[in-house]
């Protein structure tokens, strides 16, 4: 998070090559837990950086790592994390249960969190992630995005947009793409956690550039 400084913001404003996908590890939204983790930022500082990026890139995927069950994370500390994520522009989460590494200070920290409580908290965050991700995907429908083709099956080409949305492009249109091809596509409908998209014709691409 400390790498998102004014120099980076100034670069991001004018870069034509930057993809709209930012992953900013959070770990916890509780200041007391962040301090125990020896993190050099507060929950509010994290939020401030997020809002800066969201203002510049309102259609960007904003992701975070979250650790659940760090020693000392009671209901209050977990609720602080949950509330921060809920009100933030985050729309993608990697959620991990705390796992002590031998020889680290955290290995001996107390109190330890019961596995049942960790599982319950992970489920709550996963539901929140799904809700926020769905809202984000819906906000991107009918947008035209650059898509890198990653793989294919007998029905679809699967690709990733420049703002980190996984899309499917149907083969019924008769188009053929090679893996690694960069194409322009319009995002049409949700299909689970994927988005169905249609490739743009050359004249439509030229129009989007003008």
Image (tube, grey):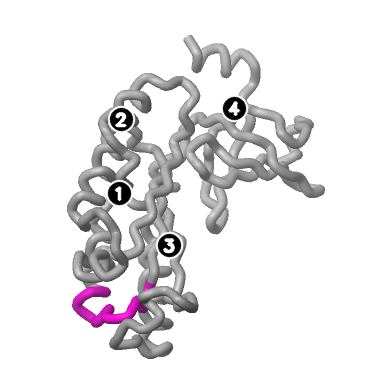
Residues under labels 3 and 2: Cα distance?
29 Å
Mark number, residue 89: 1
30 up-or-down from 207: above or below: below
Q: Nearer the viewer, mark 2 or mark 4?
A: 2
> Considering only order in the chain, which callout, 4 or 2, is on the residue closer to the N terminus?
2
Q: How many marks?
A: 4
Which residue position is annotated with label 2? 9
Q: Quadrant of residue 82?
A: bottom left
Is residue 143 rendered to the left or right of residue 56?
A: right
Q: Which residues are magenta?
A: 68-78
Is residue 19 rendered to the left or right of residue 69?
A: right
Res. 135 in view = no
Residues under labels 3 and 4: Cα distance?
26 Å
Res. 11 in view = yes
Residues under labels 1 and 3: Cα distance?
14 Å
Residues under labels 2 and 4: Cα distance?
26 Å
Label 1: which secondary element? loop
Label 3: how many residues lie within 10 Å, few (<14), some (14-19) or many (20+)?
some
> Considering only order in the chain, which callout, 1 or 4, is on the residue closer to the N terminus?
1
Percent across and percent down for residue 15 are: 42, 21
> Considering only order in the chain, which callout, 2 or 3, is on the residue closer to the N terminus?
2
Q: Residue at coordinates 37% horizontally, 19% vertically from top-left? A: 14
Which residue position is annotated with label 3? 130
């Amino acid at each position: 998070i400390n790498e998102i400084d004014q120099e980076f913001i100034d670069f991001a404003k004018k870069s034509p090559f930057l993809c709209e996908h930012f992953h900013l590890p959070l770990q916890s939204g509780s200041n007391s837990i962040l301090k125990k983790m020896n993190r050099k930022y507060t929950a509010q500082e994290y939020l401030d950086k997020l809002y800066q990026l969201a203002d510049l890139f309102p259609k960007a995927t904003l992701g975070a790592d979250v650790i659940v069950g760090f020693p000392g994370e009671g209901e209050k500390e977990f609720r602080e994390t949950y509330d921060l994520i809920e009100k933030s522009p985050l729309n993608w989460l990697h959620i991990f249960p705390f796992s002590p590494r031998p020889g680290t200070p955290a290995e001996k920290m107390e109190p330890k969190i019961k596995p049942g409580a960790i599982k319950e908290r992970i489920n709550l965050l996963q539901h929140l992630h799904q809700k926020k991700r769905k809202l984000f995907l819906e906000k991107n429908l009918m947008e035209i995005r650059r898509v890198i083709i990653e793989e294919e099956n007998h029905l679809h080409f699967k690709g990733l947009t420049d703002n980190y949305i996984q899309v499917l492009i149907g083969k019924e249109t008769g188009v053929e793409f090679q893996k690694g091809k960069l194409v322009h596509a319009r995002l049409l409908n949700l299909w689970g956690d994927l988005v169905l998209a249609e490739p743009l014709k050359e004249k439509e691409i030229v129009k989007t550039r003008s």
